[in-house]
Each structure stands twice: as structure tokens, then as C-alpha cells.
Amino acid sequence: MSYQQAIIEKIKQYQTIIIHRHVRPDPDAYGSQAGLAEIIMSSFPEKKIHIVGDEDVSLAYLTKMDTIEDSVYRDALVIICDTANQARIADQRYMNGKEIIKIDHHPSVDPYGDIAWVDPTASSTSEMIYELYLHGKADGLLCNKVAAELLYCGIVGDTGRFLFPSTTDKTFRYVADLVAYDFDRTTLYDNMYHTKMNMARLKGYILQNFDISSAGVCSIKLSKKLLQEYRLSSSETSQLIGVFGDVEGIKAWVFFVEEDDLIRVRLRSKGPVINDVAAKYNGGGHPLASGATIYSWEEAKQLIHDLEEVCQ
């Protein structure tokens, strides 16, 4: 039995299903989580479906999380989307479910779940959710325009508007299906990519103050004081991570974003594989897009050195 069929059988079996995703969500996390919920609710209206996790104001245009009691987990199926390791699952009550299913497109570094469907060749977990729907159409799965919009948003977000190498012919086939649903793509893009004035000013600061080494490693440090000056949160800076993608001479780049008790690290690459570097610093991710966590600016220097070795 395929992973998709096994997951569909479990969905049919349970009356209560709770869907999780990772902390500090992005469009793919929200899109895959809420898109799957919409598909299940449309297909099986008698079931009780919940989506949980920390709210992100910047993604409020997509959906709103549910607030549920601990008791709801009793005899519930838990599905976790877009989350490679258990430490990053938003709402750690996921362990209270009767069974756990993992659906993810990140390289498998932390095996968990009674069923784990992991496909690193997929552009996004939203793409995998649409594939699950296609597989389950014969079993009664239905997709509506709300689900289509959510999955489309997740795919667009994780492919960088189809510019990243993870975009495949399958990605375009699925997107062609999704845009046939009657949702407002113009408004969706406006919500995804509008830029506030203070964000635009921070982008200007970044482009004027980054460092680049002879190995082609670019770095920028965003201190707590700087973020306070621009009135931005650490999570909001994730919108700017692609700013160096078209700058000549850069092979890989890193954002260091200072928080209260740690420094958030965001890594991107145009070719050199960087997820092994991220794994060395309490992180991981894709070969060309990863994240990590460090606790001092001295560690930042060492991380840059490790990146330079990868880029040589």
C-alpha cells in the first residue's frame, strides 16, 4: 500500500483529526495544513477537523488557527505537515493523539509518526497535499476553491514564485489544476508580497551593509537594537531572505537575526549544499535553503567560516 493510500485510510477511519505544522510558519506551512483541513472537511463533513499552532499576523489573510482543549486529542488522529523534526512542531500536544502521521518534503533527519510520508523531491508540502487529493479522488476526496488557493499559496511561497530549482514539471501540472479554481490570484499575490514602508527601509539598509568574502559568502547581522529601530520583529525579516538571490558574485548568504536569548540563522545558496552546515548549528533544511540557531556572535564567525569552506 502506498503512503498516500495508507494516509487516506487513516483519515477515513478517524472521527476527529487535528492538523499541526511547524513553528514560525511560512505560506507552505499554513497552506499545507489548512489546505488539507479544507479537503477533509469538504470530503467528510461529519468529521471534526482542527488546525492548531501559533498564529502569524503576516499570514492571517490565509486562515485562522483553532483553539482546542487537551481532551480533544483523546482518540484523535494527528497529522503534522511540513515539519522535519519534532522539536519544531507547533503545539507540542501532538503527542497526545492516538496516532500520528507526518507529511513533509524536507530531508528526513528526525523520523517520527506511525506513518511518515517524506518526499524531498517535492517542491513543497502543499504540492504533496494536492498529490494526496489526486490519489484519493476515487475514495471520495474533494477539493474546493478555498483548498486550491491555500495549496497554490504554499507552492508559490516555497518555490519562490517558481524560480527555485525544486520547481518541476509536476509542480506546474498541479498548479495548472489549482488555478482552474475560481480564487482571486491578484489579491493573493498582493497579500503575499506587499511591502510595508519600514520593511522597504530595512531592505535598503541590508543592501548597503552586507559583507561578502572572497569565497562568495554574503552575511548580514540584524541586531535587536536595529530591529527595534525599524519596528520589525525577527519573524518579519524572513520576508527579506531572498534579497541577495540576484546579486552577482554571491554563492551563498546568511542572515543573523538577534532575538532575546539566541540568534536566528537563515541560510540560502545558489548551488553549494548548505544544510550540513545548518545541521552543525542546531538546524537543518533543504540543500539550498536552511535554518539554524546560534547563541553568540563568535559562533556566527565560525558558521561563516564553515560556509566559506563549502563555497570554495
Image (spheres, helix red, strand yellow):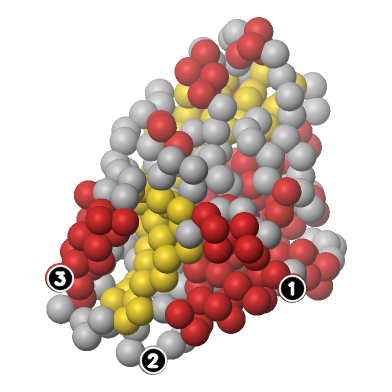
Q: In which quarter of the image is the N terminus?
A: top left
Kind of residue at badge 1: Met
The residue drawn where x is 50% and y is 68% is 241
Q: Give the residue number, with chain letter if any, for mark 1.
A: 197
Extreme residue toward the bottom, this view: 248
The residue drawn where x is 70% and y is 70% is 198
The residue drawn where x is 41% and y is 45% is 262
Q: In which quarter of the image is the C terminus?
A: bottom left
Q: Give the residue number, with chain letter if any, for mark 2.
A: 248
Q: Position of residue 46 (x, y in %)?
A: 79, 22
Kindly state the secondary structure of the residue where label 1 is placed.
Answer: helix
Using the rendered image of the protein, determine whether residue 112 is visible from the camera's viewpoint: yes
Task: Find residue 309 and name its label.
Answer: 3
Q: Which of marks 2 and 3 is nearer the N terminus?
A: 2
Q: In this view, does 245 lie to the left or right of 189?
A: left
Kind of residue at badge 2: Glu
